[in-house]
Image (cartoon, rainbow, N blue to C red):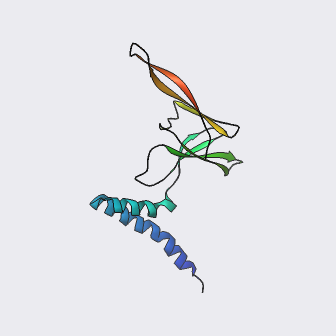
Amino acid sequence: MNIKPFKLISIYFSFYTISGIVVAMFFLFGGIMLAVFSSILLYPIYPKQVEYENQSIRVYHRFQGFLSHCCSYEVTEPKQYFFEKHLGFIEIETEINPNKTELKLNKGKILFKHEVENYNIENKASIVVDTIEIKPN
């Protein structure tokens, strides 16, 4: 009728052992089936990685598995010290480089400023700043 505390702890720590075994099998044998299985197994314990952070916005890399496409991010707004308000997910064409990009929150939309190489008529490259307005979904 009830679960003993020792069983809960053993169930929790079994995730780490099973995921280590699955990842080791993935590197040894390869294959798409083990990649999908390990993505499903690692999803609950995979840590969030902060890609960009300022006073008004925090952007995390969104984990979608090992075979996911590029540049999907989760956007949150820091509240007080420990809490965050989830604003949504964004998908952009380039990776966020903290030194060359700037993200701002403006009326529920995100202003994404980044540097882009621009080619003129003489085929000379120049770097310009491009601004994209993104609405998180």
Determine whether 26 is above or below 97 in the image. below
The image shows residue 51 at horizontal and vertical percentages of: 53, 42
The image shows residue 22 at horizontal and vertical percentages of: 37, 65
Compared across the picture, whether 27 is left or right of 84 comes to: left
Question: Residue drawn 51% across and 22% down?
Answer: 128
The image shows residue 106 at horizontal and vertical percentages of: 68, 35
Residue 130 appears in which quarter of the rendering?
Answer: top right
Question: Residue drawn 54% across and 32% down?
Answer: 101
Compared across the picture, whether 35 is left or right of 136 comes to: left
Count of residue discs: 0
Residue at the extreme front: 121
Residue at the extreme top: 122
Q: Nearer the viewer, residue 64 or 84?
A: 64
Residue at the extreme bottom: 1
Determine whether 94 is above or below 7 in the image. above
Q: Quadrant of the N terminus?
A: bottom right
